[in-house]
Amino acid sequence: MIYVIMLLELLAIALFIYYVSGRLMGSKINFTKRILSVLLGVSLTTFVYWYSYLRYIDFMSEDIGFAVADASAIIWVGSMLLISMLFYLFFELFDPIELGERGERITGQKFILQRIRHRWRRQKRLSQVLEIAVRNGFSRTIRYARHRENNRDFAIAFRDTLEQSGGIFIKFGQVLSTRTELFSPVFIEELETLQQDVKPLTSEQVTAILKKSLAAGVEDVFSEFNMDPLAAGSIGQVHQAVLKSTQEKVVVKLLRPEVKGVMRNDLDILVEFAEWVTSKSTWAENIGFRELAIGFANGLREEINFEIETRNTIQVANALRKSDYPVKIPHIFQEYCNDNLIVMQYFKGKSISRGQAVFDHFAIDQKEFGRTVLFSFFEQMLFSGIFHADPHPGNIFIDEQDGKPILLDFGAVGRLAAQQQDGLNLFIIGVQQNDAEVICDAISVLVEDNSHIDRQKLEQSVGQLLLKIAYVDKIQTEELIHAMFDIVREFGLSFYPSVGMALRSLISLDGTLHTIDPKFDMFTEAKVFAKKYKTAVLKKPFKEPRETKQRVEEELALLIPELMKLPKRADQLIQRIEGGKMILHHDVFSDKHNANFILQLFSRFVLLFSGITFGLISAALLAIAQFINTAYAVYLNTAAYTGLFLCVILLVRLSIQAIRDMKRSNT
């Protein structure tokens, strides 16, 4: 019977510890970690208490159970509380869960054992990648190479490391090979040799994906389905089929079944690898190697979700619906699409990557074709705000029926806000007019933080750049944009990610236009586009009077109520000025976020000050007790140990809050 009572008493104490520890540690405490920390704390302290004290007591004769009415029981319960909180602090410190702004978890893995197993796999994979890097001499060359940007051994070691790591590391290297504004020709040359051997999906795998992804049976959706792929990549595979309902020819894009799992794990490893490289090399830090990896990871996460590509395709198609430039975009059959499958319109055409031969075959004017493609991209970037971000030759085809351009593969799409569209427009105008001041106006809009720009020095640098491209027949787009990246980086600035994507897309587009017509000059044609656009804007009210009238009425409906309030507001303003009541002030607490931040900071300072005070007073009491031999020494020691206990409790709470704040700030 006594053992049952002991267990009940222990359970009651554990519940008490669970409640008190939660209250002491604050809100948003994770249930699983809290339970586990209490179980470990109670078990450990109970074992120590029994081993050091209770095993010497005869419970059967004294009939006292666990409720030992002396100081040891109080020390035991206090230790139980403290150890439980310390265990929770340990779990919070090493738990990879990320938190949102309000402390909520934003990871999909909920159980600690799953997280531990996932963490172990990640660490094992990261160790493999780092071992490959060391074996190839990458860590040695990154540390000792004098001119890393031109060091062939360093470039080879980097390429070998990516190639042997496989998977998305190879794809990352292939993407880096296009970043000629960051890497020297030595690196680009090595990275361009990266090749990924991708085996096509088998017929069984294709059938399984279709059955899993389609709401109806395969034979109910398609009257024909060609199992031989039109193309196979590391992410998806493309097949030709015929819809049963309309007998239309369609293209079916399937997501490879293993991609999501591999990507989800290896993308995290890639970012950690990039952080390791950045910590070892100033060169990597200067070019933003970690940010490159994060941007690549975010882009690839979108690319493996076909619902995003479906939405991108529809958005661009809708934006260009009334365009004057006849570019074709496949129609999406949304009723059959999901995150693993896309069904789109089939166009019979040839890729422009074949160059002169394909244009000769269809008897198409290369310059006019290139102008249509360029003007369409200008319209997307500068006026629609959503643009195809990967315009390489493989994504642009010629329609065999009418010779018009076809745009394919909208997995990578950029979006520019209205202000950034205006800035990019200013940049192009500044280059056309050879005006450094206009280009500097554009840069101030296109960079993330323009508060510390030295305008005079910036104009001087841009002016020097313009002198390099002045008095030439043709402006080298790649050279110009790379130079702009260099100037921005030299002044400690950085373009908005979407702006950087747009500029790199222009470089890629320029190469594509040269494939179409080797004599094509992007900036010369940009002048033609600007002239056409201005003329179209002036003529639009006369071409579409009804639409113009409706737009004017809408604007007036918004403007007139505000205009009617102006006289009253002006009168109130004059009265305040005459009465000397005009006071300008800025209250930091008027912003809710600022007020919350100050209050949290103050409350934690109070807790920290209280904890340190308890610790100092307790240490002083312990020191005084050493010199007192009377009964008062017992009271002093008791008070001192109580104070130290409270000091540790407060500091543990503050530590947990600090760790959670760090996790929130990293998301």
Image (cartoon, grey):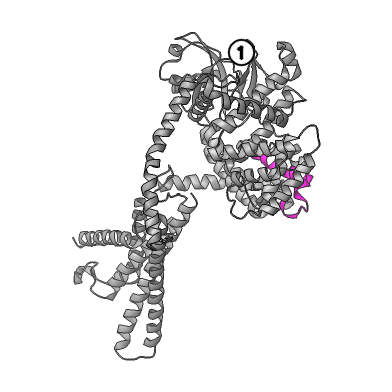
Q: Residue 128 in the image: state x and y as whole percent.
A: 62, 45
Residue segment shown in magenta: 142-166
- Residue type marked 1: Lys
As rendered, which of 460 and 331 lies closer to the eye?
460
Asked whether residue 233 appears in the rendered view, the answer is: no
Horizontal arrangement in the rendering, residue 430 relative to residue 664 (left or right): right
As rendered, which of 83 and 214 lies closer to the eye?
214
Horizontal arrangement in the rendering, residue 228 relative to residue 436 (left or right): left
Which residue lies at the image location 72% right of the left edge and 43% below the top edge?
Answer: 483
Residue position for label 1: 348
For the N terminus, the quadrant is bottom left
Instruction: Choose top left, top right, bottom left or bottom right for residue 451.
Output: bottom right
Q: Would you place residue 334 above or below residue 127 in this image? A: above
Q: Would you place residue 181 above or below residue 588 in this image? A: above
Our reading of the magenta stretch's main secondary structure is: helix
Q: Residues within 10 Å of mark 1 (few under 14, many from 20)?
A: few
As rendered, which of 643 and 447 lies closer to the eye?
447
Q: Residue 325 in the image: state x and y as whole percent.
A: 61, 21
Q: Residue 96 in the image: state x and y as whole percent.
A: 47, 50
Q: Residue 467 in the image: state x and y as whole percent.
A: 78, 43
Horizontal arrangement in the rendering, residue 390 relative to residue 357 (left or right): left
